[in-house]
């Protein structure tokens, strides 16, 4: 038997099938991880197919050394997915295969956790201890007396609390027997809600569940306002799948949301739920993945990577907050979660449900063309109105002498909220203390030496940090260029907001939730639990607080700088601003108490705010969709970005020029299909010492045909000194 193997080396030169013999001692099957001889070394690899004979001389073929796991770890569905992703996104096979297994499994970095439990042998329980414990052996006597009192105890505990040599002696003489037990490492072990009582669905929720379960193999867009009970609909759909002995995948956009979702899902589905995301320890991720692979767990919950959960016979796939940008992978391997979910749904003949209060323009467009079925939840579960949004013109605040961060209205409402014993959330999508440090005398701005970006001041750490590569620098006390002491700080970040609020409310506990305060695995849970238990009055945060959270006592949401995402040079800027405002506003007034929102802006007449205030998604969609159609932006075209980066700037520019010339010939041959084509430096010109240049093109027709031609041109210029990626409809153009 011959195995077709992909070698676990991420290099285009070796990303092809190699044939190996399967001998009697290596029981390799399709989907197995194997150890193989490769050149002078041994390497891990993946068996993607078996065949009777090779096209090469069988006498020269090497044999698989051993199979690394007791069972195949990559199923047929996932191998089909590998071919789909390599073709659609022009990826290396090995990079896709690596997505399917925990990274620590490669190289044997993580193993099963085996615990040993000791107990007295039956024959020694009834003997006189004097027969086998000599007089004066006090340590042995103490250990024996303890083991007589307990049925069994962990060897680790016994070694720590009694004599380890006595225990070894007992085991060697057969007085104590040891039982080995495999233990699964459980993430967020104590994060379990009480078992839920039966929840009665509203008529709208019932209609939504019935509409989805009455058909199969259909993509649905569930458009429900914030607080409309989308999560309960998801749970009913998963219950329906489990009742048919099927499995389910539930995706959430932020790792910060997974503990809360896990808590609710465990209350409903118990041990059937497994969690998959990058914030887990390597052991936890490995064990949760194995529970899904073996079928012990049937519901995979997690962020983007959970779409690759090794579950079989999938009954439903759910993408919550489907509009969120985190569902697009922006580093190698680049892929869009929606596409992968659609493939898996079709492969399993199940429904894909994408839910959001603010669907992406592209997804809602597909409901208009019939590609997705639309299901709507236009009212909150409690039938309460959505929170009132007050738009504050900050230009007027400055005119009336208020140069502070908070408008008079927001400050007044904050005081009233806290005085009444309610809670508030303050949203600012900028972490750190201030966005840059600048010399007032000569205009020097502190920048990262490896990246073409300004450094952000973090007061807590007393450091300037690069948010691209993570390098840290000392804060400026004087300008390195002109030696001036006049240093200005830039736009305010979440750290400074907390500092200002603590001055306003010295008696109140104020929490902050952003990337800086949630680095530890359990920090997210602690912050959310503290706020949920009303041990803090105000929660300040970035977009991590904008979606999914449900706090009954939050009656006020303050949006400090609504314009922040509005003026980005990105065609999605208006859409993202509308989504953020709607999502964060939806955190207020979710239970019996009514909510209100104060939105601070310097552009109060912008149409985004008009539609956000009235919660008119359809009006916003019509306006934005019309703009995109006129200007030929997605969904009415496809954007291709060819990003070239290298530490050698001249090499990067030369390579880009060569690619531009060849792609230009394709454009000339398809002038009616390509509506934009240009080469330029990337907005962020350098990241981690690598210079970045790019080609942007918008393709209206013949999208697949032209994209494939671009892929083949780019392949000619790949070499170890340069990195070239082709991105389709990139989520971030910087």
Image (spheres, rainbow, N blue to C red):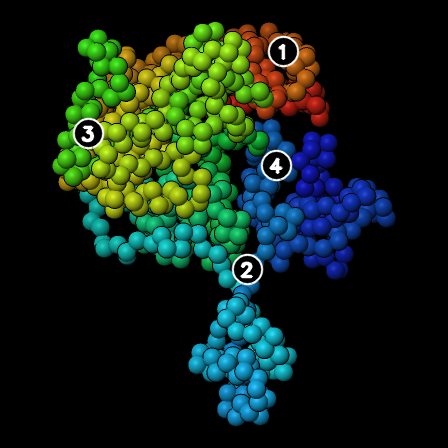
Picture residue at 69% right of the left edge, 38% below the top:
9
Q: Secondary structure at mark 4?
A: helix
**Label 4 Cα crowd, 10 Å radius (few <14 / some 14-19 / many 20+):** some
First in residue order: circle 2 vs circle 1: 2
Q: Are marks 2 and 4 in contact (CB under 8 Å)?
A: no
**Residue labelled with disc 4:** 95
Tell me which corner region of the image, top left, top right, bottom left or bottom right, holds residue 540. top left
> In the displayed structure, would residue 274 be above or below residue 305?
below
Q: Kindly report the distance in space between the C-alpha atoms of the residues bearing marks 2 and 1.
A: 53 Å
In the rendering, at what x and y percent does residue 631 appear?
41, 10
* Direction from residue 627 to residue 706 in the image, left or right: right
- Res. 660 mark: 1
Q: Is 366 placed left or right of 707 in the picture?
A: left
Residue 625 on image: x %, y %: 35, 17
Q: CA distance from mark 4 to mark 3?
A: 50 Å
Residue in front for this viewpoint, 173 or 445: 445
Q: Earlier in the sequence, mark 1 or mark 4?
A: 4
Does 343 sit left or right of 358 as displayed? right
Residue at the location (62% across, 21% down)?
Answer: 690
Task: Name the residue that disc number 2 marks.
Answer: 113
Residue 102: which disc?
none
């Amino acid at each position: 038997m011959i195995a077709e193997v992909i070698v676990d080396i991420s290099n285009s030169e070796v990303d092809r099938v190699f044939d190996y013999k399967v001998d009697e001692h290596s029981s390799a099957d399709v989907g197995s991880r194997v150890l193989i001889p490769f050149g002078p070394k041994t390497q891990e690899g993946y068996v993607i197919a078996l065949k009777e004979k090779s096209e090469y001389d069988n006498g020269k073929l090497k044999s698989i050394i051993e199979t690394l796991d007791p069972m195949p770890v990559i199923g047929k569905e996932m191998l089909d997915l590998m071919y789909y992703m390599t073709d659609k996104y022009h990826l290396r096979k090995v990079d896709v295969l690596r997505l399917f297994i925990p990274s620590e499994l490669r190289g044997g970095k993580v193993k099963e956790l085996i615990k040993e439990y000791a107990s007295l042998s039956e024959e020694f329980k009834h003997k006189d201890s004097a027969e086998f414990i000599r007089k004066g052996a006090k340590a042995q006597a103490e250990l024996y007396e303890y083991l007589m009192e307990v049925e069994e105890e962990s060897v680790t505990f016994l070694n720590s609390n009694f004599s380890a040599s006595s225990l070894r002696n007992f085991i060697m003489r057969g007085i104590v027997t040891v039982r080995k037990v495999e233990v699964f490492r459980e993430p967020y072990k104590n994060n379990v809600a009480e078992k839920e009582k039966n929840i009665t669905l509203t008529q709208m929720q019932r209609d939504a569940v019935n509409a989805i379960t009455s058909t199969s193999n259909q993509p649905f867009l569930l458009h429900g306002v914030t607080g409309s009970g989308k999560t309960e609909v998801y749970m009913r759909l998963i219950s329906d799948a489990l009742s048919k002995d099927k499995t389910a995948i539930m995706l959430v956009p932020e790792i910060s949301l997974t503990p809360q979702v896990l808590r609710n899902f465990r209350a409903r589905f118990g041990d059937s739920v497994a969690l998959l995301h990058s914030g887990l320890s390597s052991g936890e991720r490995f064990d949760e993945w194995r529970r899904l692979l073996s079928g012990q767990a049937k519901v995979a919950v997690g962020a983007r990577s959970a779409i690759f959960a090794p579950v079989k016979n999938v009954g439903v796939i759910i993408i919550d907050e489907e509009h969120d940008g985190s569902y697009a992978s922006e580093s190698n391997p680049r892929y869009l979660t929606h596409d992968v979910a659609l493939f898996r749904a079709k492969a399993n003949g199940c429904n894909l449900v994408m839910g959001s209060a603010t669907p992406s323009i592209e997804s809602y467009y597909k409901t208009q063309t019939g590609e997705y079925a639309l299901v709507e939840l236009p009212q909150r579960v409690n039938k309460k109105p959505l929170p009132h949004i007050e738009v504050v013109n900050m230009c007027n605040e400055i005119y009336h002498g208020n140069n502070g961060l908070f408008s008079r209205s927001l400050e007044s409402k904050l005081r009233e909220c806290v005085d009444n014993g309610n809670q508030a959330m303050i949203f600012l999508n900028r972490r750190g203390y201030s966005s840059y440090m600048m010399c007032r005398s000569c205009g020097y701005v502190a920048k990262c030496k490896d990246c073409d970006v300004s450094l952000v001041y973090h007061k807590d750490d007393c450091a300037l940090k690069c948010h691209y590569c993570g390098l840290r620098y000392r804060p400026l006390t004087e300008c390195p260029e002109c030696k001036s002491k006049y240093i200005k700080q830039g736009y305010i970040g979440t750290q400074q907001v907390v500092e200002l609020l603590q001055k306003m409310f010295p008696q109140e506990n104020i929490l902050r939730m952003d990337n800086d305060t949630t680095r530890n695995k359990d920090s997210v849970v602690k912050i959310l639990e503290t706020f949920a238990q009303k041990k803090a009055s105000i929660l300040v945060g970035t977009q991590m607080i904008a979606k999914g959270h449900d706090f009954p006592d939050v009656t006020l949401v303050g949006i400090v700088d609504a314009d922040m995402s509005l003026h980005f040079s990105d065609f999605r800027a208006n859409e993202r601003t509308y989504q953020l405002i709607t999502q964060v506003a939806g955190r207020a007034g979710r239970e019996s108490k009514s909510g209100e929102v104060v939105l601070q802006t310097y552009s109060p007449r912008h149409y985004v705010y008009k539609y956000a205030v009235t919660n008119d998604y359809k009006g916003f969609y019509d306006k934005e969709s019309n703009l995109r159609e006129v200007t030929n932006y997605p969904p009415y075209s496809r954007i291709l970005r060819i990003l070239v980066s290298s530490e050698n700037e001249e090499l990067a520019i030369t390579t880009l020029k060569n690619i531009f010339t060849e792609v230009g010939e394709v454009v000339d041959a398809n002038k009616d299909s390509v509506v934009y084509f240009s080469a330029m430096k990337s907005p962020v010109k350098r990241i981690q010492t690598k210079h970045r240049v790019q080609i942007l093109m918008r393709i209206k027709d013949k999208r697949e045909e032209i994209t494939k031609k671009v892929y083949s041109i780019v392949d000619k210029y790949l070499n170890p000194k340069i990195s070239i990626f082709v991105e389709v409809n990139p989520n971030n153009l910087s």
